[in-house]
Image: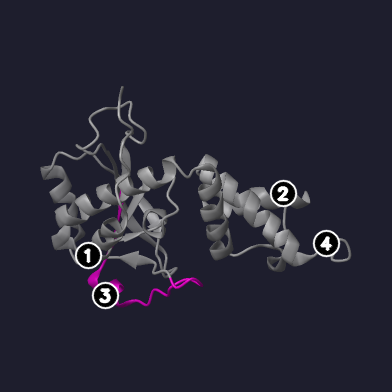
Amino acid sequence: MVRKSHFDPQRVREEIAIAAARLIAEDGLDYSTAKRKAARQITGEARLAGEWLPGNDQIEEEIREYQALFQSESQPLLLRRLREAALDWMQRLAPFNPYLTGAVLSGTAGVHSDVHLQMFHDNSKEIAIYLLNARIQYDVTETRHFAGRGDVETLSFLWRPASTPNQTEPGAEPVGIHLALYTTDDLRGAVRANARGRQARADARAVQALLDASQPLAHPASH
């Protein structure tokens, strides 16, 4: 246990948040894993009491600062491509009431990020049938319910946007798409905004507004 006489909890939280943000931005770790690994790096302790650990909102802000400092050229272009891929699939899956969530919505998506969609429909088999008819090979996994009520079935697949035929372009790798299957009743569940007022999920109209608010980055002219 960290001795309070030697450390200031606020400073420890800040250092852990900075280290965790780097692990997420560079290595693609999830928040929980990055927080634990960063805590060990900073304090040398395997377990810490909650007062010594930063919240996810604090880590998210550190990710934004890290990306602004070290990924300012690549990250905005990658984020836009991921949001375009998300909107494309949200439009395809419109009958199943899709919502975007995760780092692609918050704006902190990086090279390791996937598109996470929450689907609110009472017949999940129809979504699976749609993918089969579209010749999309998917895996069935599970995702933690956003309200903490167990796990929900999730259909996951890789997809390469048609707008990036050149596989040597930055961010031209296939995009991971994850469809977490909820019922329509789940949509009524309260999803609170974080400390910065950012919403946890967004419909297609909101995602389109995010794209409209950002200007596409022009590719440098070839000589």
Q: Which amino acid is tagged 3?
A: Asp
Q: Nearer the viewer, residue 93 or 103?
A: 103
Label 3 vs label 2, nearer the camera: 2
Local packing at callout 3 (Cα closer than 10 Å; few below 14, some 14-19, many 20+) is few
Q: Is residue 29 visible?
A: no
Q: Residue at x 30, y 51 (%)?
A: 215
Give how far apart the Cα atoms at labels 3 and 4 are. Answer: 47 Å
The magenta region covers: 178-197
Residue 69 horizontal/vertical position (percent): 55, 47
Secondary-structure class at tag 2: helix
**As drawn, 174 above or below 120:** above
Along the horizontal axis of the image, is 159 left or right of 37? left
Along the horizontal axis of the image, is 203 left or right of 48? left
Q: Which of marks 3 and 1 precedes in the sequence?
A: 3
Q: Are marks 3 and 4 in contact (CB under 8 Å)?
A: no
Along the horizontal axis of the image, is 113 left or right of 85? right
Along the horizontal axis of the image, is 190 left or right of 71? left
Residue 98 within the magenta-colored segment of the rendering: no
Q: Residue at x 30, y 25 (%)?
A: 222
Which residue was labeled with disc 1?
205
Residue 161 horizontal/vertical position (percent): 23, 39
Which residue was labeled with disc 3?
185
Which residue was labeled with disc 2?
40
Q: Which residue in the rendered view is the most extreme toward the right?
A: 5
Q: Which residue in the rendered view is the most extreme toward the top?
A: 223
